[in-house]
Amino acid sequence: MDADAHFSRRQALAGLAALTLAPTAARAAPGGLPNATHDASSPEWDRLSARLFPGKTLIVGQGTVQVFAPLRAAYGASVPVKGVSKLAPKPELYVRRLYLVVDKNPSPLAITLELGTEAGQADLETRLRVDEYSHVRVVSELSDGTLHTDSRYVKTSGGCSAPPNRDAPHLIGKTFLKLAGELRMDEPVAADVTVLHPNDTGFELNQQTVMYIPPHFVRSIRVSYAGRKVFDAEMDFSVSENPTLRFNFVPHAKGELRAEVTDTKDAQFVGTLAVG
């Protein structure tokens, strides 16, 4: 082999290596996995956001709202997710609604939270089912109508088909409230509401009958303090079994924190907590 041919061969191999190692453009392919970058879109999100917010522009970034979720989750049926508001609520500008979305889930809209006057700081923490590698998103709708969103890419799977725990079916619907922070009057206080419920998705297989378990999940949780609305949550099976929501409320005096729960069989449950 002469020197010129050898040089040309080395050039060709170097060019092939450069093509192989060069980073490809980030994109979400229809039918494939969404982009692994946290701020990417996906075909599912493009369709859902157009239905939820027709004609509206969503402002992307962490200046107003931020979502926290693990990059890798050990168990897809119980992924911790937290939406944090960066906006100090004022009478002229406050968070009206929060939305939690899992792009790739069979039912992607997990929670719609409508906030009341007693909510204080508009944060929300819960555990979600993630069925396959997917973006998890929070959308914050402000009182002026603007929409702000943030997203995280989560690597896990199987969340909607994992069978729930059925050790105590007689306790289904039992609802607990507890304070998760120090009680100070006229300041936001963190609290938890938990409902014992399998939150069946309809995609879980009964290992004994080899038949799918029918869907049966908590549809709504409405929380009030001293008779005034803290929030109304509309939910779907993308929320984990035994759904727990951590939220804030502002106690102005002694009162009762009350949760009213309805599931998809129209069963109703109530939990209360005396505060102060």
Image (cartoon, rainbow, N blue to C red):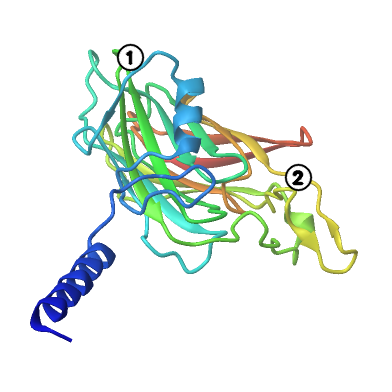
Please tell me the numbered disc located at residue 215.
2
Which residue is rendered at x = 54% and y = 46% of the image?
A: 31
User: Could you tell me residue 181's position as x and y percent?
Assistant: 33, 50
Residue under the image location 37 percent in, 32 percent down:
139
Q: Which residue has dot 1 on it? A: 145
Q: Left or right: where does residue 217 sit relative to residue 32?
A: right
Q: Residue 131's image quarter?
A: bottom right
Is residue 50 or residue 206 the one in the foreground?
A: 50
Q: CA distance from mark 1 to mark 2?
A: 34 Å
In the rendered image, residue 47, in percent from the top left (x then y), is placed at 50, 28
Viewer-nearest residue: 4 or 234: 4
Q: Quadrant of the N terminus?
A: bottom left
In the foreground, 136 or 198: 136
Q: Amino acid at mark 1?
A: Gly
Can you say whether 35 is above or below 209 in the image?
above
Q: Earlier in the sequence, mark 1 or mark 2?
A: 1
Tell whether 44 sits left or right of 17. right
The image shows residue 193 at horizontal and vertical percentages of 51, 45
Q: How many numbered discs sit on the rendered protein?
A: 2
Q: Position of residue 129 (x, y in %)?
A: 55, 53
Three-letter amino acid code at disc 2? Pro
SS for callout 1: loop
